[in-house]
Every structure is written in C-alpha cells, then in structure tokens.
C-alpha cells in the first residue's frame, strides 16, 4: 500500500521527467560547443574546438544558438557531404565595390531558394573611393560618398554582421570574429581592400593616412580645425605621386585656397613627394605633360625621386631615390597626407599563415575565375586580390605574367563576374554531390555539369582614367591622349553617381517575397543580368559615330560648352571600333 501511494506522485510527473531528459540531450551538444569556445583563443580555432563545432552543426544545420554573447552558425556542408535539401551559405567579408554588387544581385528573390548570404564588415557604411577626393575639395558632401550597407542588406534580406574577421580556417570553412563568434560557410568571398604602407617614425600625430578611406574625411576635417586655430603658414606634404596623391593634393588646394595666399594672408603650400623621377611613368609624354600643367596652374609643386625615411612631428626626412648614399634632406611641414599606395590587409597575412596562396607582396592570389589558386571555395576581388595574367588575358602558372594595378575600376568590373561565379560554384557543388559514386565532379569547373562553368574575368589592359582637379574640372587619359575641362569633370561625376545610384535606398526596386525564383537551369547566373556591367550600353539604340575629324575636335576642346555625353559617346565608339579609333587618333595628332 505504501509502495503504491509512493509511486502515484512519480507517475504523475513521469511525462515531465521524460521531457526534461529530451531537452538535456538536445542542449548538451550546444553547451559543449559553448564551453569549448570559451576556452579557445578568439583569434584562432583549435582543432578540438572545430571538431566540437562540427558535431554541433551535424545536429542542427544552419541554425543559430545564443548563450550570452556566443553565437555559432555553421554552413550545411561543413567538411562533409550533404544533400540538396540542406541550406547553403555565402559569406561576403568586406563591403567593397565588388561585394555591394553581389549583395544587390543576390537579393532573396533573386538567389537560389536554399542559399543564404551573410555580409561581415567593420563599418556600416562603405566609402566609394572614387568620390573621396571630390569630397575633400568640397565638391561632394560626405553622404554622397557612402553606400549604406545595412539598408542594402535589409532590402536584399541578407544578414549583416558588424564585426571584424580575425581568422578563417579554410579547411574547416569556419570564420572567427573579433568578438569571439564563429560561423561556417559553403563559399566565402573577400573584398577587404588594403591598408597603408607603414609610416616610418615614432610620432605620426600630424600624418593623415589615406586608409581606411572611411576615416580620411574626418582626418581632413580635424586638420582644418587646426588650420583655423593656428596662425602659421601651412605646408601640406603629400607623400605619394600616384593618382590618389595627385587628386588629394589638388583636392586640398581646392579646399584651402587656389592661390598661395588665402583669405587670412597665410601661405598655403602643397608639395607632392614622388619616389619616381616623373609622374605617371607609364603614361605617354603628352599625358605626363598635361598632369604637370594642371598641378603647376594650381600652385602644387612636385619633388621627384624623394623617399621619406622618417617622420617627425614637424619634419620629413627625405632621401634621394637615385643616390641612396646622399644625406637626408629635412622638409618642414604642418600637415602630411600619406598616400604611398596599397599594403596588404592584416587578414591576408593571417590567411597566408593558413596556407592560402599569396604573392611575394602578400596579396591573395586568384585565378581568372576570382578563386584562390589554393582553395577554390575562397574567392577574392578588389585590392586584396592579385590576378596574374599573361598577354592573352588568361590566368597562368608559369612564364611571363603581369599583375593588374590597384585601382577601383577593376573591383567594380569584377563585381558581375563574382556574382555569377559564387552562385554557379554552389550549384556545381550541389550537382557533384547528387552524382553517383565514382562519377563525382571535381571541386573546380567540370565540363559535364548542368550549370555553366565559372566565368573568367578578363581585366581591360587600359581604361578611362579621370583625375579630379579640385575646382570643377578634371583631367582624363584614354588611348594615350589627354582630355581636360569641365566636361571631363561632368563625365566623371556622371559615371560615379551612376554607380552609387544603384545602391541608394530610394532607387532599390520593391521586393515581393512571393516572386518566383529565376529558372537557373536556363540562366545559372543568380541574375539574368549578373554578368552585365552597370554602365553597359551595348543594347541601347545609338546614333552612328560622328566623323573622325569632328570627333577629334570635340575631344580636344577644353571650353565650358562641351556636352560630356557627346564626348563620352565618341570614346565609346572608339572602344567599339578599332578602325574608327585609329582614324580619330590620327586626326588628333595632326
């Protein structure tokens, strides 16, 4: 009787005990993951912690679990086979010029239904580098130069993580963030740009580095406050004679006064320090002369063959690049803009330690498909990548090669190719997993896939270079000739705004979540227009080219009455027709 009375309460709570047991069994793997993560270095995942994460991922694919600040998100196909019902994850690290195109093109209604996209960046607003010098010279507001990543990601139904990536375990496909979170991926792409070259010296208080670009305008504004409060003459030394240094020199001149004397009777001097003996050594003589003229007209001086060996608070130590044994020259300055060119991002060096192929300078080496030469599931575009090509614009592993320069135009042009290849890579991996054993496709391109092969990015060997002059005019180079005037600035402004308008919230199309997915059996590009450049005009109805003599006269004009659209059409026609280009150039040279 006593035993029966004792068992009755137990029988009442038995369902609760069984439910508690189930909950404990479900939660235990995640608690294990949390404990492992808590004792792991935030910047490096150990093999044991990765294994624990994999085990947790196998039990709960592609879900998020929060215990305090710790979040673990794993991709479906982490280190193992899966089937096509599992979700796939594309992770974009950095919101550069190529990736913003990927975000827009792979919005939820335009990407495969089983694919999720995550963007990770340390800033919420990406700065468009092409408009920064114009902002420095007060031709643009700061807002004009920004691509708002959060609203863009919200529109695209894409996850945005505000954080810094400190490590990527390429083999396990696990990303570690600065705050300790980890997440997995099926394919990862880098568009993280670059940093500045190290500044020699102990005190860089008066140095304005050009990277990160997002901070450059703030530093210029801080310097402007100092300029207003001080009474001494101003001497701005711009270290670096490339396009960025030249534009910033003229931008500062335009911002702080076009003459050597400003309104407060204080001299404003601007000096460019160039390590080469001439500016733009790879341009034609006529183009170099044009650069020298616009700088001279604006009172900007150039010191060639000058290398900065040390920076002190008020002086730069210069060494002659031709005679390295000569004594240093001391150059006083009040403001120093450090525009010496690109230097690999710290994450690139971390990846090199992980075994990712990098060139001798530290840039991530990619093939013409924008894939890492050592890890096909890793893509890279923009400044952080090094695409080695031969004279036929094909990727090569031997022989004479050249690397494309670090210029924003290459990142912009890589965007549509990257969109296509990220989606096609995932689709090909899904198909390879569905094939019978013994007929599995390789991780790279296969000729027997349902979906198109990855596209090859063929960088143009020349492009329209447009240099802002700080006063509403611009200088341009194309086909070995120089272009100058207000119309060149209007052309540059139009091209830049056309790109930026693609990502303005007010210009984004209304997304209908009920839209039917694209038929990727026919398309395979993630978008029917994914591999089309934003300024492509090939499908537009256009008038025939004007006479070569008339075209030459138009491009040589520098007056304010030139219609930039007419001149731009001439340049397009020259790009499209070799014979027409030759005729126009002959007329210009006569």
Image: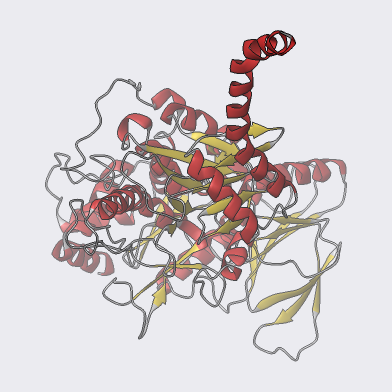
Residue closer to the observer: 367 or 81: 81
Residue 30 in sight here: yes
**Image height of 96 relative to 48, above or below:** above
According to the image, what is the colour scheme of the structure?
secondary structure
Picture layout, residue 418 above or below residue 345: above
Left or right: 560, with 473 as reference point? left
Q: Position of residue 354 (x, y in %)?
A: 57, 67
Would you say 355 lies left or right of 260 here? left
Give whichever of 318, 489 is nearer the camera.
318
How many marks on residues? 0
Q: In the picture, residue 277 is in which quadrant? A: bottom right
Q: Quick one: quadrant of the N terminus?
A: top right
**Residue 436, x across and y down, in percent:** 21, 56
Determine whether, in the image, residue 120 is placed left or right of residue 201.
Answer: left
Report the residue at 32% width, 77% height from top.
390
Q: Is residue 395 left or right of residue 152?
A: left
The percent coordinates of residue 270 (x first, y second) are 69, 59
- Residue 343 appears in the picture as rendered: no
Residue farthest along the front direction in this orientation: 1
User: Quarter of the image holding residue 49?
Assistant: bottom right
Quarter residue 442 falls in: bottom left
Quadrant that contains the C terminus: bottom left
Where residue 562 sits in the image (x, y, percent)?
A: 33, 43
């Amino acid at each position: 009787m006593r035993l029966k009375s004792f068992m009755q309460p137990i029988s009442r709570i038995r369902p609760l005990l069984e439910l508690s047991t189930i909950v404990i069994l479900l939660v235990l793997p995640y608690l294990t993951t949390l404990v492992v993560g808590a004792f792991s270095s935030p910047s490096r995942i150990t093999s044991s912690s990765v294994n624990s994460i994999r085990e947790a991922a196998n039990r709960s694919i592609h879900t998020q679990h929060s215990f305090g600040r710790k979040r673990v998100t794993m991709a479906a196909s982490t280190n193992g086979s899966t089937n096509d019902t599992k979700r796939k994850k594309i992770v974009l690290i950095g919101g550069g010029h190529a990736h913003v195109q990927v975000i827009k093109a792979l919005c939820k209604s335009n990407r495969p239904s089983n694919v999720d996209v995550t963007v990770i960046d340390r800033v919420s607003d990406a700065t468009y580098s092409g408009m920064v010098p114009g902002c420095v010279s007060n031709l643009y507001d700061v807002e004009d130069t920004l691509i708002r990543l959060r609203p863009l990601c919200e529109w695209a139904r894409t996850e945005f993580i505000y954080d810094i990536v400190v490590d990527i375990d390429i083999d396990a496909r696990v990303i570690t963030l600065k705050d300790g979170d980890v997440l997995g991926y099926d394919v990862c792409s880098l568009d993280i740009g670059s940093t500045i070259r190290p500044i020699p010296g102990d005190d860089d208080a008066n140095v304005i580095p050009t990277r990160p670009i997002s901070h450059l305008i703030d530093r210029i504004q801080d310097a402007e406050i100092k300029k207003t409060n001080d009474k001494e003459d101003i001497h701005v030394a711009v270290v670096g004679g490339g396009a960025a240094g030249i534009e910033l020199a003229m931008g500062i001149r335009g911002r702080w006064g076009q003459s050597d004397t400003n309104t407060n009777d204080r001299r404003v001097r601007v000096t460019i320090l160039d390590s080469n003996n001439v500016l733009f050594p790879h341009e034609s003589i006529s183009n170099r002369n044009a650069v020298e003229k616009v700088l001279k007209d604006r009172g900007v001086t150039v010191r060639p063959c000058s290398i900065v060996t040390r920076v002190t608070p008020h002086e730069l130590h210069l060494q002659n690049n031709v005679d390295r044994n000569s004594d240093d020259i001391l150059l006083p300055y009040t403001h120093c803009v450090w525009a010496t060119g690109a230097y690999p991002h710290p994450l690139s060096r971390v990846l090199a330690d992980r075994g990712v192929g990098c060139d001798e300078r530290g840039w991530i080496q990619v093939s013409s498909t924008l894939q890492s030469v050592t890890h096909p599931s890793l893509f890279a575009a923009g400044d952080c990548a090094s695409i080695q090509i031969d004279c036929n614009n094909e990727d090569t592993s031997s022989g004479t090669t050249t690397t494309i320069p670090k210029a924003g135009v290459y990142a912009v042009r890589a965007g549509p190719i990257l969109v296509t290849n990220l989606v096609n890579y995932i689709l090909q991996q899904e198909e390879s997993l569905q094939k019978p054993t013994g007929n599995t496709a390789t991780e790279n391109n296969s000729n027997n896939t349902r979906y198109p092969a990855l596209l090859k990015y063929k960088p143009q060997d020349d492009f329209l270079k447009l240099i802002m002059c700080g006063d509403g005019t611009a200088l341009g180079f194309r086909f070995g000739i120089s272009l100058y005037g207000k119309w060149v600035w209007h052309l540059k402004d139009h091209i830049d705004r056309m790109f930026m308008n693609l990502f303005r919230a007010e210009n984004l199309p209304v997304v209908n979540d009920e839209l039917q997915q694209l038929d990727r059996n026919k398309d395979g590009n993630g978008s029917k227009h994914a591999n089309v450049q934003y300024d492509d005009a090939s499908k537009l109805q256009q008038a025939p080219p004007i006479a070569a003599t008339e075209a030459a006269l138009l491009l040589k004009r520098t007056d304010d009455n030139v219609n930039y659209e007419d001149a731009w059409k001439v340049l397009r026609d020259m790009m499209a027709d070799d014979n027409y280009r030759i005729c126009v150039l002959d007329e210009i040279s006569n």
